[in-house]
Image (cartoon, rainbow, N blue to C red):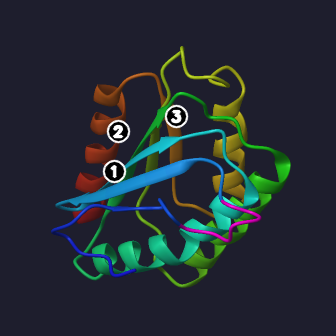
Amino acid sequence: MTISRDQPFSTEGLGKALFRPHGRADWRIDGDVLRTDVVGPFNRELAEAIGPILHQAYALLCAQGPCAEVVIVHGSALAGPEALTALTGELRKFVQEGLAPVGTAFVMAPEVEGSHFMPALLVQSFAHAGWPACQVFATADEAEAWVQGLLAAARA
């Protein structure tokens, strides 16, 4: 899959027939922000499948300077221990390669399945990977303000 600033990209159609990724991620690049919409629940296969896609996207963004990511969670945020472990492993690779954005903001409204306990687990996974910053917000406005603050500080 080729990642471009001009076209959205997705996990749709990835995986083997027997162990298809559960969940979906759709991305688009908006200036220096990777905007992601995800629908869970998520499994290990999805976490592993997004690694190569995000590698290309982060490489493209980081080559232009500081960047960030805003992830909007729809429907369900549920992910089991295997999925979170795989996610941490994929994130750690980006940190080690210098391809991590300045931060990732999740938007998880109260009606999203798992919104009462998944934020802590996600933040913990990102922290274990050495991610620069990760927070979960109830609204897109809060997430956007936080991300823009991180970007402004990184450019200063």
Q: Residues within 10 Å of mark 3 (few under 14, many from 20)?
A: many
x, y (%) of residue 132? 52, 60
Q: Position of residue 6 (x, y in %)?
A: 15, 68
- Residue placed under numbered mark 1 in the picture: 150
Disc 3 secondary structure class:
strand
What is the chief secondary structure element of the magenta stretch? Answer: loop
Q: Quadrant of residue 33?
A: bottom left
Q: In the drawing, what numbered circle is on residue 146?
A: 2
Answer left or right for 112 relative to 99. right
Q: Quadrant of residue 5?
A: bottom left
Mark found first going from the N terminus, 1 or 3: 3
Mark 2 and mark 3 lie on one chain; the one further toward the N terminus is 3
Q: Say which quadrant the N terminus sits in.
A: bottom left
Is 133 covered by the magenta stretch? no
The amino acid pointed to by label 2 is Trp
Residue 129 visible in the snapshot: no
Residue type at the position of mark 3: Val
Q: Secondary structure at mark 2?
A: helix
Write the residue at 69% across / 67% down. 17
Q: Quadrant of residue 102?
A: bottom left
Residue interval drawn in magenta: 14-20
* Distance from the alpha carbon under mark 1 to that under mark 2: 6 Å
Q: Determine which of the numbered discs, if any, sits on residue 136 in the image.
A: 3
Residue placed most toward the observer, 12 or 122? 12
Q: Nearer the viewer, mark 2 or mark 3?
A: 3
Instruction: Residue at the far front: name it.
Output: 17
Circles 1, 3 touching at the beta carbon (< 8 Å): no
State the residue at coordinates (73%, 40%). 121
Badge 1: residue crowd in 10 Å (few <14, some 14–19, many ≥20): some
